Amino acid sequence: MSNSVEVQFRDESMSLPLEEESTTPHDSNGGISVGGSSKHKEETMDEEERQFLSVFGSAYATNAQFWKGIFISCLPQGILMALIALAFFNLYTALANATWLTAEYHHALHATSASLEEDSEEDSIYMFRLGNGEWWYVGLLAGAGLAVGLVKTIWNLLVPERHAFPRKVPGFLDDIRGLHADNVFLPLPMLICSAVSIGLGASVGPEAGLGATGTALGTILSKRWRLGKHQAVAFQRNGDSENLNHEQEENPSCLSKLLPDFSQDEKLVVLDGIGAAFGALFPAQYLGPMLAFELGHHWFPGSELSAMETLARTGFSASIAFIVFTSIQNFTILKETKLPAAAYDFLPDIDAINMFEGGVLGIVSGFVGAAGLVILGLGQVLGNLTHDAFDRVGGTLGLDKRRISLGLLLTPVVGGILVGLLCVLSPLCLSDGADQMGFVISLGRALGAGTIAVAAVVKFLCLAFSIGFGFVGGPIFPFLFTGACVGTVASLLIDGIPVLVAVPACMVAVPCACIPAIFTFTTLSSMILVLGGAATSPVFFACICSYTTVCGCGVLHKLFERSRRASSKKGTNENGAQADLMVEKEEGANACQPNDGPA
């Protein structure tokens, strides 16, 4: 008779007894020896049955903790994140409408092919041509940088140092991978800075502020409800925590009986918040959980998280946020747009040649995305140099940079001036690019391949100067805009490639070069451009080729290795120079001291 081994699921709601090879001694007649007898489960399951049931995952819904998570974590976080996203979106939209999004700019963005044909004498989209931007964009972006710097500085003056605004803000990738917020108060100034950045024209996206808020909200919720067992408190109070734990479990407080304990489910609760944060960001709410699944890397054999339970919870929180947001706003932050009407006539004719074209465009988009990463790195280097220069000036003025950092205050101003000058060159590059992307897709042909190509390069530069010099936001929306520009240029320069293949493929293949979310971006392209299954096939192949070209072939790894070596060499040189300076000072001091003989 065999011993049994229990396989415990994460929620411990179900245990499956598994048979091991028998190690019990038998007598010569085949009976079981008395000394080898042991306890068994009443029900046993052989290996084949266990493998069969493992396909379906754990029975997570049989555990009360799951339903507590649904109603006390997913539901409130979904509602709250929808309201936060709504306020955030309306704030930066109001700032844009009050500044750069003038009636003339808005009219040009929403021009149609018919209106361009009727308005033959006056080009209604003239302001989007190269060099037609307004010079007051420079002052506007410089003012935006000053506003962002002031928010950061005032925040650091008001809060303790451990809650200060960091020099480098964590991105949404850090949130999805870490599933924990070290500073749960940081999203408040982040949202303000991000809204000011996007609303006044800086080239950043909204995902960073929303992702940080969802992460912090989940972290707060998982810490706030540690009222059931008080395990952490018990360990801190005295060394003999066993009796204290036993007493608390036997006689819990009244409040502990009412409130759930999420202290063991922090990652799940944080994922609930991230799902809610991204629920109103994309045209379909399931893209948020899909993005978390692809980027999180938390689901693998032996992981403490159940994939299907996580999907159920994040899907619920994202759906709640989506319902609340769209019920009030009638659309999501990233809205649908459509290709020229004639492009959809090509839908039934997708063939192997178009798949090949998608693959080639994916490779090209991969190199474009890699070039964008290099430009982002250069922007970060220039921003760091500017920040350090301002901090040195502050040091000569006697300022404590931990409280008042001139680098934190004035670096965004310099970045704003640079971005403003670039937007004078290419007015299409203002803000996150969500509105302008629709114009490029539908009417990019009216501007010509040269103007759109320059806009793609300028957008990368604007993104680099915005993020590198202290504006707050993410890179996804600007990368999507650049990808749409690349696809439009490809369709204009190469007559054989249809718009239906070039634009959707390049739009998402450019960010896929460095963001491992192939399924998410493929589906996003289909949702934004209202594609069918056949038209999405070249898009999927383009994303695979783009990611393989940059990450799969090690291009990205080599870029980071080169950057690391350069930083290490710089640090070594600086340390060597400091050591030489210390030696010179010591030698000078020794030379000035009287020589009284050997010590």
Image (tube, helix red, strand yellow):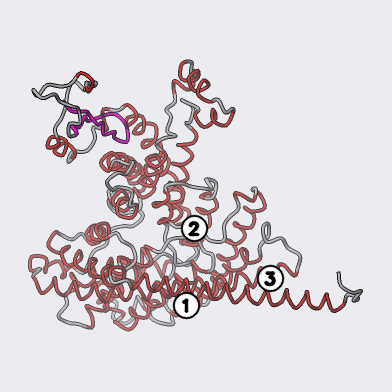
How far is the residue under mark 2 from the one under mark 1?
20 Å
On residue 422, the disc is: 1
Quadrant location of the C terminus in the rendered image: bottom right
Query: Residue at the spot x=37%, y=40% of the render?
Result: 268
In the image, 355: left or right of 506? Answer: left
Query: Residue at the spot x=21%, y=73% of the render?
Result: 502
Amino acid type indicated by mark 2: Ser
Instruction: Say which quarter of the image contains residue 499.
Output: bottom left
In the image, 362: left or right of 99? Answer: left
On residue 194, the disc is: 2
The region drawn magenta spans 1-20
Q: What element carries label 1?
A: helix
Amino acid type indicated by mark 3: Arg
Circles 2 and 3 in contact, beta carbons < 8 Å: no
In the image, 417: left or right of 477? Answer: right
Q: What element carries label 2?
A: helix
